[in-house]
Amino acid sequence: MPIAIISARRFNQDTSAAKKLASAGPVFITDRGRPAHVLLTIEEFRRLSEGPVNIVDLLAMPAAAEIAFEPPRLTGAFARPADLS
């Protein structure tokens, strides 16, 4: 998903162009060169604001296999084998 960055002045002058950019991904709107706002489609906003997602749902995503995840190994008192007997 590409991220676009436009100035507040350009956003005010050409809102329709910003809306077209938002259909492909988030649009960061800057004030004096610093990010101030983000323009999203309503579908993307709803997806992001659905609420908490559990780890099972995240692991079931088709793209989950592409996510690099290397948790650090525990050391010390917590790094002992589990007693499953």
Image (spheres, grey):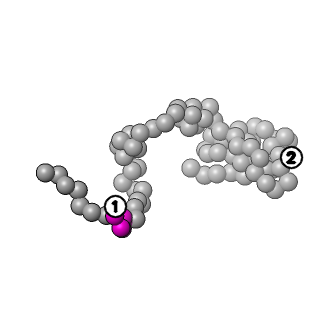
Q: CA distance from mark 2 to mark 1?
A: 55 Å
Instruction: Residue at 45%, 38% (x, y): give it.
Output: 53
Instruction: Residue at 79%, 50% (x, y): give it.
Output: 30
Q: Residues within 10 Å of mark 2 (few under 14, many from 20)?
A: few
Instruction: Residue at 39%, 50% (x, y): give it.
Output: 64
Nearer to me, 54 or 11 = 54
Determine the secondary structure under disc 2.
helix
Task: State yes or no: residue 38 in magenta.
Answer: no
Specify whether 37 is left or right of 22. Answer: right
Instruction: Please give the residue where the numbered disc 2 appears in the rendered image.
Output: 9
| Amino acid residing under circle 1 | Phe
**Residues shaded magenta:** 73-78
Instruction: Residue at 35%, 41% (x, y): give it.
Output: 56
Q: Position of residue 10 (x, y in %)?
A: 83, 47
In the image, residue 56 above or below residue 34 = above
Q: Position of residue 80 (x, y in %)?
A: 27, 63
- Of badges 2 and 1, the one in the foreground is 1
| Amino acid residing under circle 2 | Arg
Instruction: Tell me if residue 70 can be seen.
Output: no
Q: Position of residue 20 (x, y in %)?
A: 68, 40
Q: Residues within 10 Å of mark 1 (few under 14, many from 20)?
A: few
Q: Quadrant of residue 82?
A: bottom left
Instruction: Please give the residue where the numbered disc 1 appears in the rendered image.
Output: 78
Nearer to me, 83 or 19 = 83
Instruction: Tell me if residue 69 can be seen.
Output: yes
